Amino acid sequence: MTHHRNDAHSHSHHHGRRTGHDHSHGVVDPLIATTAEGLWALKWSFVVLMITALLQVAVVIVSGSVGLLADTIHNFGDAATAIPLGIAFLFARKRPTKRFTFGYGRVEDLAGLTIVLLILFSAVVAGYESIDRFFHPQDISHLWAVAAASVLGFLGNEAVAIFRIRVGRRIGSAALIADGQHARVDGWTSLAVLAGVLGVWLGYPLADPVVGLIITLAIFGIVVQSGRQIFSRMLDGVDPQVIDEIRHAAAHVPQVNEVTDIRARWLGHRLHAEVNVTLPSQITVAAAHTIAEEVRHQLLHHLKYLSLVVIHTDPEEKSGERYHRIEKHSHDGLPAHSHA
C-alpha cells in the first residue's frame, strides 16, 4: 500500500501546436480572511448594518415601537457577528505550528458558536420586550418614522446581502454567500414592521407587539438553523453530497479500480479529505504515485474548497481498511493485542 500526501503541484496543458497555459493547485484557503477583498466585505457590511441599527434606535426612542425595537436588536446582533468572525479569520491566517499542526481553522467554529449565542440573546431580549408590551400597552407615535425606519432596515440589509453575495461569488466563499442570504432574510423581517405600523394606524395597537413576536420567532429559527450547522461542523459532520462528489471524481481517474473509503472534515472552511483507492497490483510505486497525483488533481477541480488530500493506494488483493487492521499478536512480553 502507498500513502500519497501532497499539498501543492503544478502541471501544464497544451492546446494546439503552440498555445498552452500553466496552472497549479496549492493549499486552497477558502476562508474569506485570506484575501483583502473578503475582509473588506466584512468591514463594510459591519459599517452599513451598524449605521442602519443606530438610525433605527433613534426612531425607537421617539416612537416606542416594540416591533421596531425587535428588528433593531436583530440588526445590532447581525453587525456584532463581524467581530468574532474577524478574530477567527485573523487566527486562520496564522501558520500551523508543532502544537497546532492543522492550523487554527477550528477558531472559526468557536466564533460560530459565539455568534449563535449572540443571536439567541437578541431573540430572548426581543421576545421579552414584545410579551411585556401585551401586559403594559404603550401608545406608539411617529408612525411615519417607524415605517421609514422599517424600510431603512430593509434597504440596509438588502444592500449588505447584494454586496456579500457578489463578493462571495467573486472570491469563491460559500460562507460569505450564506451570510448574504441571511442578510436578505433579515431585510424581509424588517419589512414586517410595516405590517405592525399599518395595524396600529387602522386601530389595532396590539399589532405592534404581535409583529415583535413574529420577528422573535424568526430570530429563533435562525438560531436553530445556524446552531445545527455549527454543531455539525464541530462534530466533523460533512454533507453526504460532498462524499459522493469525492467518490465520483476519484473513481473516474484511469486505473483506479475502486474507491473504498472516504473520510472528510471541515477545519474552518478548509475541507480535508482522506481517500482509499484500489489500483492494479502489478504497477510500480512510481506509477501508483502518479495515479495518486491525478486523483488529487481531479478532486481539487471538483471540490473548490478542498485543501488537504491524503490518497491511500491499495493493491487489488488487499483493498479497503479491513486489510489495514493488525490482527491479535504478542511481543515484548505484552499481552495479546490488536491494532485497528
Image (cartoon, rainbow, N blue to C red):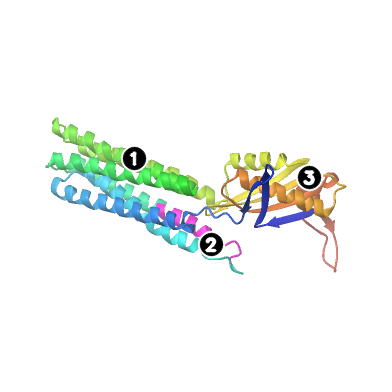
x and y, in percent, of residue 140 in the image:
13, 41
Going by the image, does 152 lie left or right of 304? left
Q: Nearer the viewer, mark 1 or mark 2?
A: 2
Who's the residue at 23% across and 44% down the image?
A: 68
Q: 73 or 250, which is in the foreground?
A: 250
Residue 217: mark in rendering:
1
Residue placed under numbered mark 3 in the picture = 278
Q: Residue at x 48, y 49 (%)?
A: 171
> In the visual, does 300 lie left or right of 167?
right
Q: Which element type, helix, strand or loop, lies under badge 3?
A: strand
Q: Secondary structure at mark 2?
A: loop
Q: Residue at x 31, y 47 (%)?
A: 74
Report whether residue 67 is seen: no
Question: Is the magenta region chiefly helix, strand or loop?
Answer: helix
In the image, what residue type sits under mark 2? Tyr
Q: Earlier in the sequence, mark 1 or mark 2?
A: 2
Which region is colored magenta? 100-115
Q: Position of residue 137 (x, y in %)?
A: 15, 41
Residue labelled with disc 2: 104
Q: Is residue 299 rendered magenta in the image?
A: no
Which amino acid lies under the numbered mark 3 shown in the image of this protein?
Thr
Front residue (pair 15, 320): 15
Q: CA distance from mark 2 to mark 3?
A: 33 Å
Mark 2 residue crowding within 10 angstroms, few (<14) / some (14–19) / many (20+): many
Q: Earlier in the sequence, mark 3 or mark 1?
A: 1
Q: CA distance from mark 3 to mark 1?
A: 51 Å
